[in-house]
Image (cartoon, coloured by chain):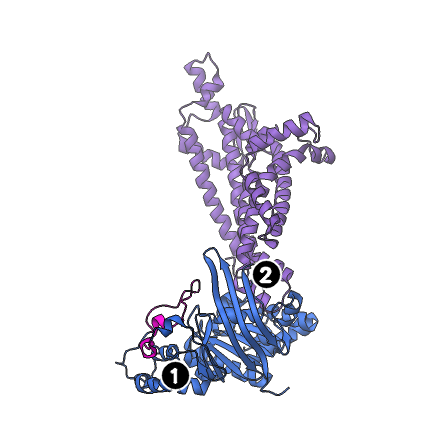
Chain colours: A blue, B purple
Amino acid sequence: MTTNSPFLTVDDLRVHFSTEDGTVKAVDGLSFEVARGRTLGIVGESGSGKSVATQAILGLHSRETAAVSGRITLDGAELTGAPERVLERLRGNTAAMVFQDPLTALSPYYTVGRQIAEPYRKHRGASRRAARERAIEMLAKVGIPNPARRVDDYPHQFSGGMRQRVMIAMALVCDPDLLIADEPTTALDVTVQAQILDLLMELQEEFGSAIIMITHDLGVIAGVADDVLVMYGGRAVERGTVREVLAAPRHPYTWGLLTSMPRLTADVDKELVPIAGSPPSLLTPPPGCPFAPRCAFVDEVGDGRCAAERPALPEGRGAACHLTEEQQRTFYGERIRPRLA
Amino acid sequence: MLRFLLRRSLGAIVILLIISAVTFFLFYAIPRNPALLACGKTCTPDQLAIVEANLGIDKPVPVQYWEYMVGIFTGRDYPIGHCPAPCLGYSFTDNRPVLETILDRLPTTLSLAVGGAVVFLVVGLAMGMLAAWRRGTLLDKSLSSASLVLGSMQIYFLGPLALALLVHNNQVFSQPKYEPFTEDPTAWFGGLLLPWLVLATIFTANYTRMSRATLIEQLREDHVRTAKAKGMSRSTVFFRYAWRGSLIPIVTIFGIDLGSLFGGAMITEFTFNLPGLGRLAVDSVTKSNLPMLMGVMLFAATMIVLFNILVDACYALIDPRVRLA
């Protein structure tokens, strides 16, 4: 298999939760691809469906409450609707996950060694002793000092950054081909964030895994991602390589994310511009473009088209927006970029 | 561990001192002279004074309390008999040290409590786990409604009903009675089976509901999702990860329940006519046998305090974040 053919393909993924108030369309028609050795950054506000979508890849949603449809193909194998046995063999083995808050995501009741060794024993059929050796090896690999001693410690005996390293060691213990990192640095100190991201990148080079990095921080995306998917209201609104998206973003929502982000290089008196309004209701989504109620460019499109018609996301590089590509370029160059300088 | 035991034992002693003092002084606030009862109907002031001296209640109350507390460690001599240490008082109604009577009654109460607790803990947890495992299904809903109905029952309703239906009318169970285990284990078991089941029914319902609720709560925990995300089977996720966390609230309640059952299950003992500590306490109240009541209360309080310490020690076994110090 060549390194650039898609390893993971997600096609028209929908995750709907039935609640007492109605159906919450947390993910509503999402498509993307990730190739081996590449890192896809998924950006968006809380509630944009980033985590829900990626958890659906591993089939983590309870079948009673969540209806998942669409196609998810991992290394040629169809995952949607796959029986639980198949998914169990896949989780932690071919595809693993690093969660946001390592304090709550690790079990407080078992030693880190046991928690790291567990998937290795299950997926590789390793003996207790071999799995323990492997756990120590993984702890060393993620940069935990004195791993042979710390393997018997409990999660609460580690600092936040060290705990996230443990989490990463656990995710990588079976050498997965796909690693999903769900805001892996959000709960950590800024100085530790950079270390964790560097670690992930080093490990990716060593293992050649595909990585999906979920974040709301464009800085993280700039640092680690190859490709970017911007999500809004359960859908992708912009797609491109990291260079394309950061150099010339096309969607007004992406512009909003950029102008609301503080920068050290900017003039201190320059005000941050938050995106007005709040994310759309996933229960009763507006009929047109989900971003229209918060968008400053609705009048440029005119004819009430934004409120009536949902814009499609083109294949490859592009944005789900009714503005023409020409307009997108002009508005970004004239109105947005000066604010970012 | 040693520091924990030492610190908690000191705490327990303080609590028991407070309980004993409050109980003791409360009894003397009761406007009824025990000597008058012991003295009989034709009582002259001279006779009354002699009786009061015999009972040791002619002295100021704080002095009496002091003598009582000292007696626990050294034993006491009353004009009508000797009370060896630990002396929890002397009952003038039946002319023997309070502790002797308590120890006579204790096996009944312990048998009732331990047997009942085994039933309700095992059955309650199993039902709760079953309901949580199959949550949302008909089985879960039936178990939940059944436990709600049974949990709302009272022993004084369920007990006589069971007696009437299962003993008097149909002879499914033998007449409840207490037969010492050491003398006839089969009779011990047969005589206590119905009381155990009735006592356990009400507790089982509570344990079913609680273990179901805490398990479902645990299943939503982040670390339980992590276990699933790393490929653990559903039963591993359930039994190894979720169940462990659900134990803390269960152990807490179990400690309190067992502790209070060891102090006597009054209504159950009364319903089935079992001579345990609960009966003893009620009888002592009706007979105004204050020394006996004082002794039983102190004993029951000790049990509850003791089980609280045990519960805290169990926390450390379940959760490594809890450090005993």
| Percent position of residue B154, x then y | 55, 34
Residue A257: give x, y in percent of width and height: 37, 77
Marks 2 and 1, how far apart in space?
A: 53 Å
Residue ID for mark 1: A324
Q: Decide if residue B274 is in sight here.
A: no
Residue closest to the eye, A194 or B63: A194
- Name the amino acid type tagged 1: Thr
Point out which mark residue B229 bears.
none
Residue B244 vs A292, above or below: the answer is above
- Chain ID at mark 2: B
Residue located farthest toward the left when viewing the structure as drawn: A269
* Residue A294 percent location from the top left of the image: 34, 72
Q: Is residue B300 visible?
A: yes
Check if mark 2's residue and mark 1's residue have beta carbons within 8 Å: no
Tell me the mark number nearer the camera, choosing from 2 and 1: 1
For the stretch drawn in magenta, the main secondary structure is loop
Q: Write down the chain letter for disc 1.
A: A
Q: What span is in magenta? A: A275-302
Decide: few, some or many residues near mark 2? Use Cα within 10 Å; few <14, some 14-19, many ≥20.
Answer: many
Q: Which mark is residue B241?
A: 2
Disc 2 secondary structure class: helix
Magenta stretch encompasses residue A91: no
Viewer-side residue, A85 vs B239: A85
Numbered disc total: 2
Q: Which of the 4 quarters of the picture holds residue A37? A: bottom right
Q: Which residue is at the front of the view, B266 or A51? A: A51
Q: Are marks 2 and 1 on the same chain?
A: no
Q: Label 2 amino acid?
A: Tyr
Q: Residue B17 versus residue A105: which sits nearer the camera?
A: A105
